Image (cartoon, grey):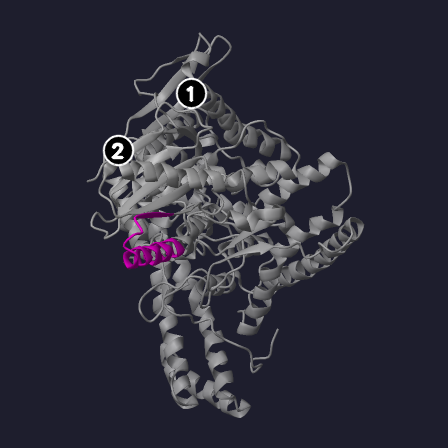
């Protein structure tokens, strides 16, 4: 316990905060996003030395874990849990607002993620005898430091076992590490408003089941926790304004006078305390810490709620709210005697985020935990009864199929779409949830609403392997079989082949497969091939991109343009089978906005591409929008000519334009700039030389060397001569690169028909095709 006059940093009175948190990321905070290649720090060590070093790190982590746990448990043995948890929540669970009113991500007072506050809450409830002392700033700083390190040391302890056990056991530890790392750190499977909307619509048909399980309908329960979040943030902002104002006053007398008035002290109380302060000769900084420490005792009131008042506000019966709180709350000392080490992977707070004070009141220190762990809570509420569980499972499946189909209908308006398509041969039969045709592109979408069990997320290997197979691998195998049938020439298909759809499947040039899940599976789905490689599972099919429905919604919302959505899905699936990377789906979306996925050169030599903070711009935009602050939407940047090309191609009714857009959309901004500069220089050169009738520039996007662009500048308006020169331009590309498709673009020298006069898609001679050209006539 620090002396009252110990001089420590004291900034528990934070700035104004937003009621809505961001998606927490399993990675370091940064003020800017970065793409970098990660070299293993031990790459110059021998294999044996690396293993030995890892085991030493594990032993060190074991000691650090024990020391941190002792600090945390000792703190709650002696200090009031209400003051401590309120102080932690007020400092760490808000998002600071800058002077312009924009929420700042990764800056300001946010230090501990929500997962650490949940851990602290569980440990506090596990102590046999709760303390009564009010925590000071010094106490809270020591506790924060311990909470900050304990999760990392918990995870690193497993390094003690590196190199031990069978190969199979070591491979399985990789799965466990990925799952446990996600479970202990990552929170929030989507942005708040979308999560709220999705859960509302998911639960709408289950009102009877929800009332039976928890006393409230789904929407009433969601509204209750949203109200708790908003009320907590409003109360803490109002409370923290006072000590911040006191501490800005010019002299000690004014600081103390405002503090005493705000705390409601009597004249005699003021005189006695001020005399003590003067006798101790506290500096300005020490007095600021003094008044803030004593103010902490008022913070728990911001997190305390009355059941009767809450029922009145929600306009529901008090009995209903009381039942909901009793179902989703733990009493003080409600985890008495539990081993805190178990809370890292199975924290009871994830199912019961509230703390019951008495029959009529409760604390809500981390009410957003309800939304973070909503699927686990719903599984617990509705899974206990067989009939409720069956109804919930049916609704999950029906809802997800309709939700995903609706997203594709909204983005690809007018595109032929079919659902629940069955197909068969004599040897097999299958069903594909959704088929979307966009020009000559076909999207095969498998939808999986299976539950991800708590046991799997704790690292339970049998459950995890079962989920990986059922939710991720089996849909991939099924869509691969259908894609193989569809891409087989009709004359070579099995005679028994049948598919029940009204879609016209002729003229398909590319089939892209996609899997969509309801729940986020520990971000494993973001790059499943790397995990399978690490654990030694060899699957014979190329794996499709797998996204949660929440992430798919965000991808479509941010990209907006149908051709960019298609380009993202096509390249995203190809990327994961060609590049090793570390990042979740929204990091990949941020990477796409920066590069268009034109970055394959970074992956040479098997290095891993690490995506750090790539989603920051998306996080900032969506979170501010949810809080009512409109910012410019993050967009992929194009040079003027490339932008004009994509816009014009998007708006014409031309068969084959999707392949053209896939090609031209694969150039990074840097390459676009180089292209435009080269075109400009060539145009000036040709204008200066009147005998220079035709010339061309060609190139391929970085990483996607099977496709290229040839830009043909021409003086002549003779169509036949232009066509001959276009064929020559495409031939140059095929001869000098590995490209198999060439988007040939003709521009007249004076640029009258900007951005192009004619364009078409040429195929390399070694590709069989009915038509070598798809021509876009002058428009």
Q: Is residue 332 above or below residue 259?
A: above
Q: Main secondary structure of the magenta part?
A: helix
Residue occupying the point 53% across, 35% down: 453
Kindly identify which residue carries mark 1. Answer: 486
Residue occupying the point 34% across, 43% down: 564
Seen in the image, is 336 located left or right of residue 61? left
Residue 308: horizontal and vertical position, in percent?
32, 50
In the picture, the quarter occupied by the C terminus is: top left
Asked if residue 680 lies in the magenta stretch, the reply is yes
Seen in the image, is 505 located left or right of residue 132? left
The magenta stretch is 673-696
Residue 40 visible? The answer is: yes
- Determine crowd level at label 1: few under 14, some 14-19, many 20+ residues with C-alpha closer than 10 A: some
Dot 2: what SS? loop
Asked if residue 371 lies in the magenta stretch, the reply is no
Seen in the image, is 566 located left or right of residue 57? left
Kindly identify which residue carries mark 2. Answer: 654
Seen in the image, is 496 located left or right of residue 637? right
- Determine crowd level at label 2: few under 14, some 14-19, many 20+ residues with C-alpha closer than 10 A: some
Residue occupying the point 29% across, 52% down: 691
Residue 522: horizontal and vertical position, in percent?
53, 42
Looking at the image, is mark 1 or mark 2 nearer the viewer? 2
Q: Along the line of sight, which residue is nearer the eye, 342 or 404?
A: 404
């Amino acid at each position: 316990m620090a002396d009252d006059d110990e001089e420590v940093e004291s900034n528990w009175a934070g700035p104004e905060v937003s009621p809505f948190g961001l998606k927490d990321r399993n990675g370091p905070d940064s003020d800017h996003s970065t793409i970098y290649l990660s070299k293993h720090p031990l790459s110059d060590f021998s294999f044996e030395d690396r293993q030995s070093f890892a085991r030493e790190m594990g032993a060190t982590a074991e000691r650090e874990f024990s020391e941190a746990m002792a600090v945390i448990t000792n703190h709650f043995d002696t200090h009031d849990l209400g003051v401590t948890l309120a102080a932690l929540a007020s400092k760490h669970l808000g998002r600071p607002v800058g002077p312009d009113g924009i929420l700042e991500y990764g800056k300001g007072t946010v230090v501990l993620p929500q997962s650490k506050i949940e851990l602290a809450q569980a440990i506090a409830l596990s102590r046999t005898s709760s303390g009564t002392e009010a925590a000071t700033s010094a106490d809270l700083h020591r506790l924060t430091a311990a909470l900050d390190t304990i999760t990392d040391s918990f995870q690193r302890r497993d390094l003690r076992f590196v190199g031990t056990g069978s190969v199979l056991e070591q491979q399985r530890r990789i799965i466990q590490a990925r799952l446990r790392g996600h479970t202990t750190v990552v929170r929030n499977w989507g942005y708040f408003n979308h999560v709220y909307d999705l859960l509302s619509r998911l639960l709408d048909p289950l009102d009877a089941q929800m009332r039976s399980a928890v006393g409230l309908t789904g929407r009433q329960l969601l509204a209750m926790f949203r109200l708790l979040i908003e009320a907590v943030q409003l109360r803490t902002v109002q409370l923290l304004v006072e000590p911040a104002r006191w501490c800005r006053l010019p002299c000690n007398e004014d600081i103390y006078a405002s503090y005493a008035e705000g705390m409601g002290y009597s004249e005699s109380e003021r005189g006695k305390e001020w005399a003590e302060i003067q006798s101790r000769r506290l500096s300005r900084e020490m007095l600021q810490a003094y008044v803030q420490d004593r103010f902490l005792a008022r913070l728990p009131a911001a997190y305390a709620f009355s059941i009767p008042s809450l029922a009145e506000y929600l306009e529901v019966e008090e009995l209903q709210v009381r039942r909901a709180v009793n179902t989703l709350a733990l009493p003080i000392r409600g985890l008495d005697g539990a081993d805190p080490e178990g809370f890292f992977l199975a924290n009871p707070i994830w199912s019961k985020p509230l703390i019951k004070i008495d029959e009529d009141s409760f604390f809500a220190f981390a009410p957003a935990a309800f939304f973070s762990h909503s699927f686990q809570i719903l599984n617990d509420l509705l899974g206990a009864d067989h009939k409720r569980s069956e109804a919930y499972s049916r609704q999950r499946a029906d809802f997800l199929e309709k939700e995903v189909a609706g997203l594709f209908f909204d983005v690809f308006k007018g595109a032929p779409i079919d659902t629940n398509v069955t197909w068969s041969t004599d040897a097999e039969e299958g069903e594909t949830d959704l088929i979307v045709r966009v020009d000559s592109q076909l999207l095969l979408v498998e939808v999986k609403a299976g539950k991800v069990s708590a046991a799997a997320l704790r690292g339970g290997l049998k459950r995890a392997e079962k989920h990986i197979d059922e939710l991720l691998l089996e849909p991939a195998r099924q869509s691969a079989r259908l894609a193989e049938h569809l891409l087989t020439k009709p004359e070579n298909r099995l005679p028994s082949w049948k598919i029940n759809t009204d879609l016209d499947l002729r003229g398909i040039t590319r089939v892209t497969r996609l899997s969509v899940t309801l729940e986020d599976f520990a971000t494993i789905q973001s790059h499943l091939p790397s995990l399978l490689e690490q654990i030694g599972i060899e699957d014979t099919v190329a794996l499709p991109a797998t996204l949660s429905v929440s992430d798919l919604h965000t991808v479509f919302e941010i990209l907006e343009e149908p051709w960019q959505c298609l380009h993202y899905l096509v390249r995203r699936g190809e990327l994961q089978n060609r590049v090793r990377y570390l990042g979740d789906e929204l990091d990949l979306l941020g990477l796409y906005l920066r590069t268009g996925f034109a970055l394959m050169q970074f992956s040479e030599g098997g290095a891993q591409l690490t995506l750090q903070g790539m989603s920051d711009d998306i996080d900032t935009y969506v979170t501010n929008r949810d809080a009512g602050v409109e910012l410019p939407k993050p967009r992929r940047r194009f040079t003027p000519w490339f932008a004009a090309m994509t816009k014009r191609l998007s708006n014409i009714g031309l068969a084959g334009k999707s392949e053209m857009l896939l090609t031209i959309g694969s150039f990074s901004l840097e390459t676009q700039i180089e292209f435009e500069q080269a075109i400009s220089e060539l145009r000036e050169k040709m204008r200066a030389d009147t005998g220079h009738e035709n010339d061309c520039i060609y190139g391929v996007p970085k990483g996607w060397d099977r496709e290229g662009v040839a830009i043909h500048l021409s003086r002549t308006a003779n169509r036949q001569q232009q066509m001959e020169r276009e064929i020559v331009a495409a031939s140059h590309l095929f001869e000098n690169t590995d490209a198999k498709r060439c988007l040939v673009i003709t521009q007249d020298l004076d640029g009258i028909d900007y951005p192009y006069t004619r364009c078409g898609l040429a195929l390399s001679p070694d590709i069989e095709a009915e038509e070598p050209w798809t021509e876009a006539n002058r428009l």
